[in-house]
Amino acid sequence: MSHDEQGKPAATATGVSRRGFITSVGSGAIGVAAAGALVKGAPPSPPPDTLKAGDLSAVTITVNGRRHQVLVEARWSLLYVLRDRLGLTGTKIGCERGECGACTVLIDGKARYACMTLAVEADGHEVTTVEGLMQGEELGPVQQAFAEDDAFQCGYCTPGQVMAAEGLLRENPSPTIEDVRHGMAGNICRCGAYAHIFTAVVKAADLKRGGR
Amino acid sequence: MDDKELYFWRGPLPETQALPPDAAPEPWGETRVVGKPVTRVDAYDRVSGSAIYPSDVILPDMLHAAVLTCPHAHALVKKVDTAGAEKMPGVRAVLKDGMPGTNVPWFQGRGGFSSRLFDPHCRYEGDEVAVVAADTIYQAWDAVRAIDVEYEVLPHAVTVEDAMKPDAPGLRDGGNVPPAAKPYERGNVAEGFKAADVVLEQTYTTPCELHNPMELHGCVAKWDGPRLTVWESTQGVYAVQSGVANALKLPLANVRAIGPYMGGGFGSKLETGKYSVMAALLARKTGRPVRLFYTREQVCRSMGNRPANTISLKVGAKRDGTLVALESRAVGTGGAYAEDGTGGVDYLIRELYTCPNVRCENSSALTNAGPQRAFRAPGHPQGAWALESLMDALAARLGMDPVELRLKNVPAASQTRNGVPYSTTGLADCLREGATAFGWAEARGRRPAPSHIKRGVGVAAGMWQGGAGGPPSTAIVKLFPDGSANLNMGASDIGCGTKTWGAQIVAEELHVGLDRISVEHADTGTTQFATPSGGSKTVPTESPAIRSAALDVKRQLLSMAAEQLKVPAADLDLRGGEIVSKADPAKKLGVGQVQAFGRRGVLVGVGYRGPNPQGKATNPFGAQFAEVEVDTKTGEIRVLRFLSAHDSGRVLNEKMFRNQVNGGVTMGIGFGLTEERVMDRQLGKLLTANLHDYKMPTALDAPADKTVIAIDPHDTFCNTGAKGLGEPATIPTAPAIANAVFHATGLRVTDAPMSPARVLRAMAALKPAPAGRKGEE
């Protein structure tokens, strides 16, 4: 089946070219099959690799266990989509250039900056935000430890700190204080609550192991 | 800096209603809830993500705004062409100078000077030129980039030295240099130095530090007919209300400012921002709510800083360590609009130690750089850097222990306030008990291991000019018939736990569990007047009013119960939801059984902050101890452990006290080791406009080994005896580290921050090779 025969140029408003774009920005396995179709079916020129601002692509992102199908511009960050499209404002905006960590979330279980991740890169992936650590209305173990140890002051960087700690503990369930300092080094707390953050992360490890 | 300035309130300070003569309650003895390390009442909200900060506010039909700022250090805007931008997808409104409503005076000053909202005379890289509101923030930025501005670029000066030159480009009529203020003088320094056995002199420099709170500056604005609501990330909702009402010529009653959660300020969010006015104008023009937050880069450029200072300090002392003369000259710049770049710099020099002869002279000049704002203990960390470094050098010269030298000069009275005694001073105890807990003598005596990595310890002391608080403050406590209570106050909780210690005080007086107390605050529509949370005055200002309000409720309740039980009210006590007779414990009533209360529905108690006692000075004090490791090959400094001993009067919550002190220390580590705003002198542009280039301390810069000691001298200057803490905690940190570096290496680093490059340069200049421990400049 040829796109030309159907009168729909491949380079315009169908998913094909966008899938090609996604692959080109390096989101791994997403859309490989579609990209294959592009190679076979696309006209030789011009290469359909440019999206205009405002062009929308459909992505499916699983956030806190719930599948969301969202139309996004290719330039939208995951942070923007989480906060402004899905209304999950627990994930905070701090620098939008991967320097402060306020937007830290888990992507497939690993701590990542949502501001440095395009929404299209998150297509097909599992995202966990601070809201997703809750067990109903109950705090999760990392959140509980942060609350008990007063591991914050203004609390604005806290969701990011909590998610960084969650990511750290999933990789290393029994970190030393030095492990914690290194694991949390990507998240700035301007109030300087680090001393309490360190003890909270160690306590969280204990809570996760069923210490209480 | 005048003490009144520490209220951060423009215009005359409102007065609180006079207190009844019997209003002052006895100081607390043993407490059940106050002081205890309870978990914050809003911890759940902050760790769960359910707390809605102003930048999280999403309203139906809300637009998103972005600001176009001047890319030049100094320029005149000749033309702003917004035609292309206005036609772009999603764009709903564009504002620039000359449009209706934009003629709002801003940055007023000497000689009738005033700039305006979009002043065509841009005086620094970051001055606002235009603003766009669009359906998405991406579209708003597309439009900002499409605005075509014609600038006439003017010569600039971004350093004080350049700005003070006679042919320097003028930022305003009347010149860059404001008329010199009269130097501070007491005694006669020339005589003092003549009488001294030892005189030391040194010039110190400190970096320009950016506040960079984690939440960006901005707000969401929404109109309901003539009434405006602003959700703003601010330290003071009443300051926002008055600033916005003034700018837009609105009745105060028609401006509601809301900000119960806010992501840090450190002084940068005491003022009303242009963003609030721009958002309100855009919202009015479009008939839709508007969210406007600055970017991190814009915050770095425009939202305030701690001025860099050069301080030349000279000390004269007797052989036994008695200080006889101190003389300082400080220079600084408040940037493009703030005229004073040295506020508070000399306070410690005048006040921290007993010294009969003191002279302090300050000078400032305007530069083409972002304007300064009050930054956590304005001037004090700079002054401490100079004074506490020089005291350490003096101790070394005299062969005295640095703790002993300080103890020798601890004052009992305020020398800058006509010699009135301090209500209490824990300075000596901070030094003594801190030294003991730190293991000071032992650590100082440790023999250095032969290695290129040197270890040392250092001490520095400090105090804060404010921290006493005072009127005005009004708090309301409501008691419900089931014994639960609500606290209503205007103060912001900027991270210091205001809601929590407020609830603890109510719990203490009304014998209610913290889980049965709700707190309503920081909303001009529903809560009481408060000056902005700054100057370490929120605790000493609000806590006595809260206690009085709780006691007012209690008094009413007990008097109603007394009538019902037919016993004197003085015989009754409130315990665990019951009113019990002290004489006959069988006589009791549940709170809900008080009939007169039942008829009333809710009991309302009002508390006011009374004045501080006459003829006394109240200040918080502290001393801090650092142990560091210096890699003499790389110039890297690691803070290994840190101890802080602070007299901030009564501790309201032990856990939050510790946290706040450690936070101040972390910020002090930034001031001493990592943070520095760098301007390009040729281009006049900010080179550190992000959090990669502007280095705030991370988890790896802050030691895990931090100890905090509270010294409570049982002050009764107010009914809670609690002084301020936020600012004192960050004042002595950097010099304590510098003094530890000296102890480790024999190297006296006089320029902050002590970056590896600076340490290596200083080391190269030190001849012969570092002797360590023994040497002195």
Image (tube, grey):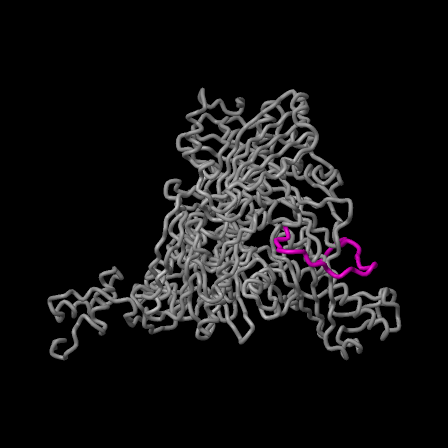
Left or right: B264 as drawn, with respect to A122: right
Choose between B372 and B385: the one closer to the eye. Answer: B372
Q: Which residues are magenta?
A: B6-33
Give the percent coordinates (x, y) of residue B268: 53, 53
Choose between B561 and B681: the one closer to the eye. Answer: B681
Q: Quarter-wise, where is residue B580 in the image?
A: bottom right
Left or right: B258 as drawn, with respect to B718: left
Q: Is residue B22 shown in magenta?
A: yes
Give the percent coordinates (x, y) of residue B556: 79, 69
Choose between B754 and B348: the one closer to the eye. Answer: B348
Where B247 sits versus B411, above or below? below
Q: Is residue B750 shown in magenta?
A: no
> How many numbered discs, if any?
0
Q: What secondary structure predominates along the stretch shown in magenta?
A: loop
| Residue in the image at 79% along x and 75% along y | B594
Where A24 sits versus B754, above or below? below
Residue B291 in view of the camera: yes
Choose between B520 and B504: the one closer to the eye. Answer: B520
Where B766 sits versus A196, above or below? above
Q: Quadrant of the N terminus of chain B?
A: top right
Give the percent coordinates (x, y) of residue B240: 57, 61
Left or right: B682 as drawn, with respect to B568: left
| Residue in the image at 56% along x and 50% along y | B109
Left or right: B28 as drawn, with respect to B160: right
Residue A176 in view of the camera: no
Where A164 sits versus B618, above or below? below
Give the percent coordinates (x, y) of residue B383: 58, 37
